[in-house]
Image: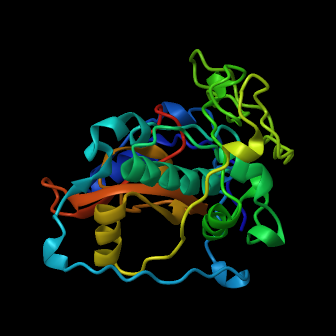
Amino acid sequence: LQISSKNVIDFEMIDYINSNQNHWVAHNSPRFENTTFDQVKTLCGTIIDTHTVDVNLLISSNDISTADIPDTYDATTAKPECISVIGHVRDQSDCGSCWAFGTVEAFNDRRCLKYSDQTIYAAEDILSCCSGIRCGLSQGCNGGNPTAAWKWLTTTGVTSGGDFDTIQSGSSCNPYPFAPCSHHVDSDLPNCPASEYETPQCTQKCSDTKYPISYKSDKVLAKTSYSIKGEANIMADIFLNGPVTGSFIVYEDFTAYKSGVYKHVTGDELGGHAIEIVGYGIDEKSGLKYWKCKNSWNSAWG
């Protein structure tokens, strides 16, 4: 697949999107100003075709009637003590680590809903250590497999790990090592590097030397991992157990998203991307059913 090196911001495309549908609003996103589609492609680091790797999860069957599922549900407001956890938007920076974020955040938020655990868990631990044959051919910043990462959570687990700005604060074992970056936007953030970050080395040690707990002792594991098929089953699982990991194909117009219920309108395919689905509902304006998703492109997008 050859991706255009033209800039993401295309005012003709924005006008076309806004003129040809009213489900969502496109705009000149500050997150991608002066960024090329080649650069956006590096953020889409998810293996969509899992048939090429030996990774399978049991299919879950929820013991709940469709009639018992509310039409609208938002996990970000389901439990007061978890609002700051589920509502926290992270930044994968210039690394194709969406597969690790989409997995760890869903695990993180489910754990908070189940046990009121407000610890932030480390995308970095999955990113650096869940790799190769042991992890569905995941390759760190070059992309990975969320399904394999969920299996990894049940067998190896994950450490705590806050955002980049918590490094050497002693608050977590493995804070995310890459700083949020501006992608050439005029802001207080530093510019992203000219090339994508290299995957951190798996050391099986806490990178924050001030953190008082050992790497091994800090680990927590998921009790189980499974896949879900069917719209009603996904809704039921989110309602019963919390957010889920999802993946989809990103098209060029997705980078211009501002608000509303996104549907692909125009533009070429950029790659597979993983996110966390935190809720669902029916849009009052358009009548469209939607998934409410949390991305890892910081709060300057979406």
Q: Quadrant of residue 7?
A: top right
**Above or below 169: residue 196:** below
92 and 60: which is toward the camera: 60
**Relative horizontal placement of residue 201, taking residue 171 as reference (left or right):** right
Q: Position of residue 52 (x, y in %)?
A: 72, 82
What residue do we see at 54% from left, 44% from top?
A: 296
Q: Position of residue 205 (x, y in %)?
A: 82, 40
Q: Quadrant of residue 274?
A: bottom right
Q: Position of residue 297 (x, y in %)?
A: 54, 41
Q: From the image, which quarter does the C terminus lie in?
A: top left
Q: Is residue 90 visible?
A: yes
214 and 18: which is toward the camera: 214
Q: Residue furthest top?
A: 188
73 and 259: which is toward the camera: 73
**Above or below 132: residue 174:** above
**Relative horizontal placement of residue 64, taking residue 33 as reference (left or right):** left
**Above or below 171: residue 246:** below
Q: Is residue 44 visible?
A: no
**Relative horizontal placement of residue 258, taking residue 93 as reference (left or right):** left
Q: Position of residue 172 (x, y in %)?
A: 65, 32
